[in-house]
């Protein structure tokens, strides 16, 4: 009986709506209501997109380490600032406005690509530094044991950056943060010696070699926004060198127009992360840098990278020709990245001097 009444009530509601929609005045009111509702949803999603389409604020690695050490009553030992900066970068990636967006599958984040590419740029630097920390900086020599916590953290940060579920990316990266925090706790304990951070010139140079290749690749991709014919220099400098398959003497490279803003924001994220890691290195490797007279070179790299973080006043990333009427944001960014990369090459040469 109850089921029959429910069915009848449903039928009455449908017929009532049908009768209302057949009336011209009621139909117009209904259409206005639906249109207003849809427009309101669209405006709400646009406001959310604008709110989420922002990178986190920068921070001072040295000041941040002092605040955390005071709050946790820990000792600021060699490597404390760099390790804590790596943790802070990862937490900023996960906890910024909108959270981690690269693996989202629902609106409005699925329509956004600038911040996800920015996130990937930051993530690449986190991966590179965690690998250098695990393989070089925390080990005294090639035959020494690797740190157990860093052996957990490094592969966690290399988990698929776009996994939405089973498991979500955020969960795996937080496991990496937990392992780094465990390493940091042991590192700051002056009564133990099982966790180490070796601030040596060769360790810093090894990490900078990775950074150099990353920035070189980004610079090439940015410059290819206008298309270039490049001479193949793959085997330059070694007359006996070989490669797997033959390649043409001239290469035509051009970034597709749909990927120009992607490369720009990936570079911007990568530079943002590098600024903080280099400032932390300036503190932890201070003695080595001063001895090698390389402190000014490091600060020049930071200054070039900071210039890449200036506000973009255009609503879109413009891609004018090199000397054309319209600006080319990619070439401007490539200029900063190339100068920073050249300074890194000089810094590595200083560090490798006996």
Image (cartoon, rainbow, N blue to C red):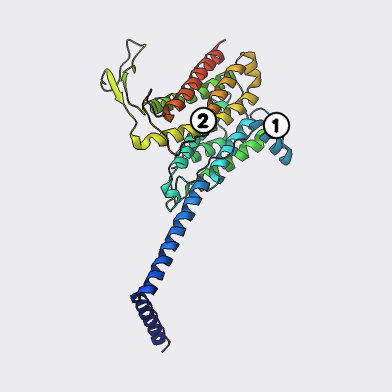
Q: Nearer the viewer, residue 322 or 89?
A: 322
Q: Is residue 127 visible?
A: no
207 is higher (above) or lower (below) than 83:
above
Question: For residue 245, which quarter of the picture?
Answer: top left
Around disc 2, counting alpha carbons within 10 Å, would you say few (fewer than 14), some (14 to 19), or many (20 or more)? many
Does dot 1 land on a helix, a strand or a loop?
Answer: loop
Around disc 1, counting alpha carbons within 10 Å, would you say few (fewer than 14), some (14 to 19), or many (20 or more)? some
Residue 164: where, in percent of width, then height? 44, 50
- Earlier in the chain: of badge 2 and badge 1, it is 1
Q: Residue tagged by mark 2?
A: 271
Q: Nearer the viewer, residue 347 or 221?
A: 221
Residue 90: where, in percent of width, then height? 55, 40
Q: Is residue 68 visible?
A: yes
Residue 236: where, in percent of width, then height? 35, 13
What's the mark number on residue 76? 1
The extreme bottom residue here reads 1
212 is higher (above) or lower (below) than 157:
above
Residue 246: where, in percent of width, then height? 25, 20
Question: For residue 27, which quarter of the picture?
Answer: bottom left
Residue sitting at 54 percent across and 38 percent down? 153
Q: Nearer the viewer, residue 215 or 151?
A: 215
Does dot 2 land on a helix, a strand or a loop?
Answer: helix
Q: Quadrant of the C terminus?
A: top right
185 is higher (above) or lower (below) than 38:
above
* Residue 287 falls left or right of residue 125: right
Residue sitting at 58 percent across and 31 percent down? 276
Residue sitting at 45 percent across and 51 percent down? 108
Q: Nearer the viewer, residue 220 or 41?
A: 41
What's the mark number on residue 301? none
Q: Quadrant of the N terminus?
A: bottom left
């Amino acid at each position: 009986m109850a089921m029959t009444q429910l069915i009848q009530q449903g039928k009455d509601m449908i017929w009532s709506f049908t009768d209302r929609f057949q009336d011209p005045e009621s139909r117009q009111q209904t259409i206005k209501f639906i249109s207003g509702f849809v427009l309101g949803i669209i405006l709400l999603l646009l406001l959310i997109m604008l709110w989420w389409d922002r990178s986190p604020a920068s921070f001072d690695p040295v000041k941040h380490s002092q605040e955390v050490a005071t709050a946790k009553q820990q000792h600021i030992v060699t490597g404390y600032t760099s390790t804590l900066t790596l943790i802070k970068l990862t937490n900023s990636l996960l906890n910024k406005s909108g959270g981690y967006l690269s693996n989202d599958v629902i609106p409005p984040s699925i329509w956004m690509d600038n911040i996800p590419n920015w996130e990937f740029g930051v993530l690449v630097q986190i991966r590179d530094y965690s690998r250098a920390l695990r393989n070089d900086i925390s080990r005294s020599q090639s035959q020494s044991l690797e740190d157990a916590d860093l052996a957990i953290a490094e592969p966690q940060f290399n988990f698929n950056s776009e996994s939405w579920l089973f498991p979500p990316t955020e969960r795996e990266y937080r496991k990496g943060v937990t392992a780094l925090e465990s390493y940091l706790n042991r590192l700051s304990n002056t009564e133990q010696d099982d966790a180490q951070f070796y601030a040596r010139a060769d360790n810093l140079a090894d990490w900078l070699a990775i950074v150099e290749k990353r920035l070189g690749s980004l610079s090439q991709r940015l410059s290819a926004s206008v298309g270039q014919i490049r001479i193949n220099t793959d085997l330059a400098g070694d007359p006996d060198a070989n490669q797997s398959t033959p390649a043409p003497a001239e290469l035509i490279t051009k970034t597709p127009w749909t990927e120009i803003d992607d490369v720009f924001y990936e570079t911007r994220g990568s530079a943002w992360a590098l600024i903080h890691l280099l400032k932390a290195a300036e503190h932890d490797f201070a003695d080595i840098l001063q001895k090698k007279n390389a402190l000014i070179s490091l600060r020049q790299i930071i200054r070039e990278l900071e210039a890449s973080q200036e506000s973009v006043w255009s609503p879109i990333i413009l891609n004018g020709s090199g000397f054309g009427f319209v600006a080319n944001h990619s070439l401007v960014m490539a200029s900063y990245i190339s100068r920073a990369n050249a300074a890194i090459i000089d810094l590595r040469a200083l560090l490798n001097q006996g």
